[in-house]
Image: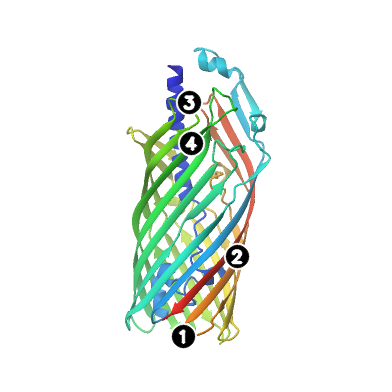
Amino acid sequence: MRQNKLSSSILVLGIAGALTVSAQVQASGLQLSEQSVTGLGRAFAGGSLANDDVSAAYYNPADMMLSSGTQAQAGMTFIGISIEADDAGSTTRLPANLGTVLTTPGTVPVFVTRPSSDFGNSVLDNDDGGTDSFVPNGYFAMDINDRMRFGLSLNAPFAVSTSYGKNWVGRYHAVDSELTTIDVNPSIAYRVDDHLSLGVGVSAQYAEAKLTQALFNPFSAFVKDGYAEVKGDDWSFGYNLGATYEFDATTRVGLSYRSRVKHTLEGDRTISDYIASSNGKLDAKVDWTAPDWLALAFYKRLDDKWAVMGSTRWTNWSLFKELRIKYVNGTETLIEEKWEDSWSFNIGVSYDYNPEWTFRAGYVYDQTPVPSAEYRTPRIPDSDRNAIGLGFSYHPNPQLSVDFGYMYIMFDDASTDNTLSLLPGYGGLITDTLQVDYSGSGNLIGLQASYRF
């Protein structure tokens, strides 16, 4: 009877833990701006106001009216992130007489708190949770008439990947976290007059997540862990709006809005190498809303060589106040979150050396939505960041542009202070407190080609 209760509790713990992280992965500060390689070179300053590629179909559909004719673009950005996680005093609190407590009802636990590094054969001093990934983009734009244009974008607005060793100190909190999104966004732009253009689009967004973690087995006491994997996916829909105002041929501003997208990720969770009665699959789902964002951009051409641009973006992360996890048996778990809205600020410059070569540079400051170490998890050890971008375009002829961009990201040092109950069915009988210091950096390299037909 005691073991049945324990098995049920472990099963609920695993599902709750995995799906909680699923939502945190998607509602992380790692919102992707890397939808354009030309934009990468100027740190995405000015959004698509620079009119140097076809990315207006995503950033601001109204900006499509800055160009004409039929255009197509495809690109890829490599994102290499290094995240060093150093154990800063992680501890485990448990009864010294654990075996007797679990097998003999009425036994009074004698608690001890020990460094987590005392348990198992883990490599506990540090671990690199960063991974390498590729973010693609594809765009198409064409004239409908002299006052309207059609655009289509295909890209990944959210993409997260962290991976730690299976024996690292935080294995009960997280091992692997993967999120892939694909956003298909047709849009229409309309020129109202010589100054004002408007745009509107509809997004079909696919989200897929896979998350893993270790499960504490009290009957093997840190010798052999169980393993949990949760997978889920969903299609959902949103929209985007844009407005562009051209003061004259050299000066313009743009305002763009992308709506929130409500997802219900459905899938299953698999427990393996664990207590026999707990192994297997169980259906579960979680509701999560991708936040909406609003961006303001400006562009100014100084002369026939130089142009400057800037932008700011607000993201509505404060939507993520709670996470409600629903299980196949009709029960729910409510988890409170306290994310905060975040801002980014970009400034950039471009230099047209000659008709064949254009060079770019830019700077961006990105604010994390994670309010404190209590809410920062090893799934997404996010922090404020500063980044510098450099890039160039080569135009071998008036139709073709080949673009290169590079960005170096510097993450602020951050920490995690999370306490997890390893046996929730037994209250706080065994708790694991993960205290980790993070330091990280990133290198982004992008290559794309655009063609005017």
In the rendered image, residue 146, in percent from the top left (x then y), is placed at 33, 84
For label 4, the SS is strand
Which amino acid lies under the numbered mark 3 shown in the image of this protein?
Ile
What residue does disc 3 label? 275
Q: Quadrant of the C terminus?
A: bottom left
For label 2, the SS is strand
In the rendered image, residue 200, in percent from the top left (x then y), is placed at 34, 69
N-terminal label among 1 and 4: 4
Q: Gap in Å between the C-alphas at discs 3 and 2?
A: 47 Å
In the rendered image, residue 142, in percent from the top left (x then y), is placed at 36, 77
N-terminal label among 3 and 1: 1
On screen, 282 above or below 159?
above
What residue does disc 1 label? 249
On screen, 252 above or below 75?
below
Which amino acid lies under the numbered mark 1 shown in the image of this protein?
Ala
Which amino acid lies under the numbered mark 4 shown in the image of this protein?
Ala
Q: Which mark is residue 201?
A: none
Q: Gap in Å between the C-alphas at discs 1 and 4?
A: 58 Å
